Image: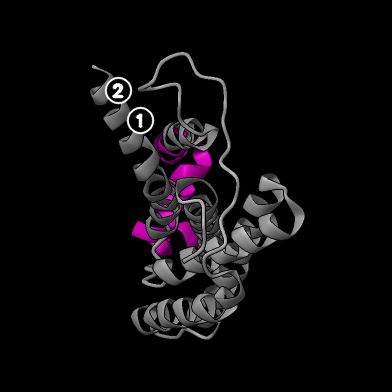
Amino acid sequence: MSAVAALIAATLNAGTPLLIAGIGILIHEKSGVLNLGIEGIMLMGAVAGFGVTFATGSFMLGFIAGGLVGVLLAAVFGFFTLGLYANQNAAGLAMAIFGAGLAAFAGQPLQGVSLPSRAIPFIGEAFFSCHIGVYLALIAAGAAAWFLYKSRWGLILRAAGESPKSAYALGYSVRTIRFSAVLFGGLMTGIAGAYLSLVYTPLWA
């Protein structure tokens, strides 16, 4: 039973960065924007979070740095696709390549450096020995579902993606809604990347 509990805990920890990034992707794709550059944004969030944590010793600052870098890259993506009407597929692929290359370059001084492991109080091996980010990600998934299907703003967001003319006719700025959703997606993806390098590994390679 101990082995099964450890497997469940490992599965939750491994799936958490995908869940966090998936929430962000869900929100901005519901607004009608496709971003294929998520991997590049996640890698940049990972190296930014790791670098800040290594320099300051603060894991919280590392997560904040990862999220901010994600927002910055998402803003660049939004500028090209929503501001200049560039092709979303091409811009997303360019962002993926750019992010991966820049992360590899910026992370060279951190190669092989590891961070101290973080222990938190636990009650059971399977569900209560995970990093707090696992539980926050699960809560965020429920909050995203509620936002999309139970809130007024979620309805507006989905209208911007599924029927932009209707949203515009009701007086909403489709471009503003989509840009906000892209920024949120970048924030969540950056945090997911920071989780990879700060919690899941925790090292930069």
* Magenta stretch: includes residue 33: no
Question: From what the image shows, is residue 56 above or below residue 117?
Answer: below
Q: In the rendering, which numbered label is found on residue 5?
A: 2
Give the amino acid type for the residue marked by disc 2 in the picture: Ala
The N terminus - image quarter? top left
Residue 24 picture location, percent across and down: 46, 53
**Of the pair 190 and 111, the residue shown nearer to us:** 111
At x 51%, y 57%, the residue is 203
Give the amino acid type for the residue marked by disc 1 in the picture: Ala
Residue 150 picture location, percent across and down: 43, 32
Q: CA distance from mark 2 to mark 1?
A: 6 Å
**Of the pair 29 and 168, the residue shown nearer to us:** 29
Dividing the picture into quarters, in which one does residue 15 lie? top left
- Check disc 2: other Cα within 10 Å, few if <14, some if 14-19, many if 20+: some
Residues in magenta?
144-169
- Residue lying at the far top in this picture: please name it: 123
Which residue does the numbered mark 1 point to in the structure image?
9
Residue 43 picture location, percent across and down: 48, 67
